[in-house]
Image: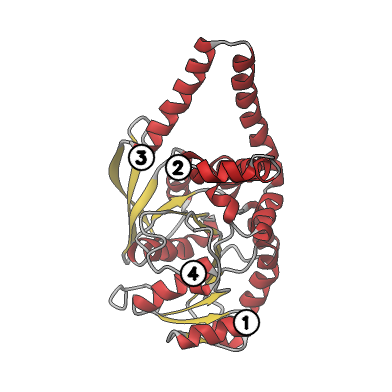
Amino acid sequence: MRDRPGGPSRAAVVGTGLIGGSILVRLHEAGVDVTGWDPDGATRAEGRRRGLAFADELAAAVRDRDLVFLCGPLPTLPDALVTVAGQAAEGCVITDVGSTKGGLADFAVAHGLTDRFVPGHPMAGTEQFGLTAAVPGLFEGAAWVLCPAPEGMAAFRLLAALVVDVFAARVVPMSASVHDSVVALSSHVPHLLAGSLAGAVSGSDVRDAVLGLAAGSFRDGTRVAGTPAKRTADMLLNNREQVVRQLDRVRAFLDELSAALVRDDLDALVDRYRRARDLRTALLDRELRASRREFPTGGDPADELAYLLALGRAGGHLTDCRVGPDTVAYTGHLPATADPA
């Protein structure tokens, strides 16, 4: 990373739980001058014990940095964004890792920060938490959503290159509203379903027998129920409108399965499960095609932005972003069934 022209030479990570800690450790491994900060003194001490730079004061952590990651709990992010924007250098790029994007993106617009703030969401994690659970390779191969704004394309390009080069993740460019709709189905409703299944078993009179026989389907289906409860609740409430809307869609399909079961309707059950199996197969065996696009780095970014947002909405991603003196080149990957962006 040190040899990458235009890449950030100094970064900070604010909030060093599982995600922030993993970002911090990976940046440190990649040779970036990175400083961490966490409101918990014990976490700062643990980080120093591991050979990581930690500041005792937030202002000291973000001063003179090129890039700052905001990795605290969702409810803290608006205040953290304003505070860091006021304490960091004027040209410092700021991003976050929150699991909802709409509210914070609107907040950034209201505070005139869209030229330097790029909403982000790495789609990776475990049910573990805290700096001690940090995994430097956590994001390898994972989708990492970034939400570009017309006035913030330079910041987006810097982050996209970093996410690909350092974290080996797939950059998924999306608008904040599309992101929140998509993750309601891909992440948030699965947390509701996992919690429902685990919660139902916890109150069952055969609870211990279920645990004794629990196989892969139960373990996989309830894995995310092990996420800290407050973190899950914050995530769901911050995307409440979309979660409720998409939950209605899931509930309707579940009602179809239930009705077919009550009717003893084998054909209906088989039909619904074939549809479900086709989707699962598509998840595991997506055929993608790669293409390269170039855009001028100066002037109106409308075409570049349109390309990026169409790519993400169609289920595609970026695996390369190269910024030159006059042009930016992207390598994008689209599902074979999607229209070219």
**Which residue carries the number 3 mark?**
334
Q: Are the residues flagged by discs 1 and 4 in contact, CB closer than 8 Å? A: no
Residue displayed at 36% across by 59% down: 140
Determine whether the residue tagged by mark 2 lies in a helix, strand or loop: helix
Residue displayed at 60% across by 89% down: 56
Q: Amino acid at mark 4?
A: Ala
The image position of residue 263, as x and y in percent, is 62, 10
Residue displayed at 42% across by 33% down: 280
Of callouts 2 and 3, the N-terminal one: 2
Kindly report the distance in space between the C-alpha atoms of the residues bearing marks 1 and 4: 29 Å
Of callouts 1 and 4, the N-terminal one: 1
Total residue callouts: 4
**Which residue carries the number 1 mark?**
87
Q: Is residue 182 left or right of residue 83?
A: left
Q: Count residues near mark 3 (Cα–Cα under 10 Å), then give few for <14, some for 14-19, many for 20+.
A: many
**Which residue carries the number 4 mark?**
133
Kindly report the distance in space between the C-alpha atoms of the residues bearing marks 2 and 3: 32 Å
Determine whether the residue tagged by mark 4 lies in a helix, strand or loop: helix
Q: Are the residues flagged by discs 1 and 3 in contact, CB closer than 8 Å? A: no
The image position of residue 267, as x and y in percent, is 50, 10
Q: Is residue 216 above or below residue 129?
A: above
Q: Is residue 276 above or below residue 308?
A: above
Kindly report the distance in space between the C-alpha atoms of the residues bearing marks 4 and 2: 23 Å
Q: Considering the image in quadrants, where does the N terminus appear?
A: bottom left
Of callouts 4 and 2, the N-terminal one: 4
Disc 4 or disc 3, which is closer to the eye?
A: 4
Q: Are the residues flagged by discs 1 and 2 in contact, CB closer than 8 Å? A: no
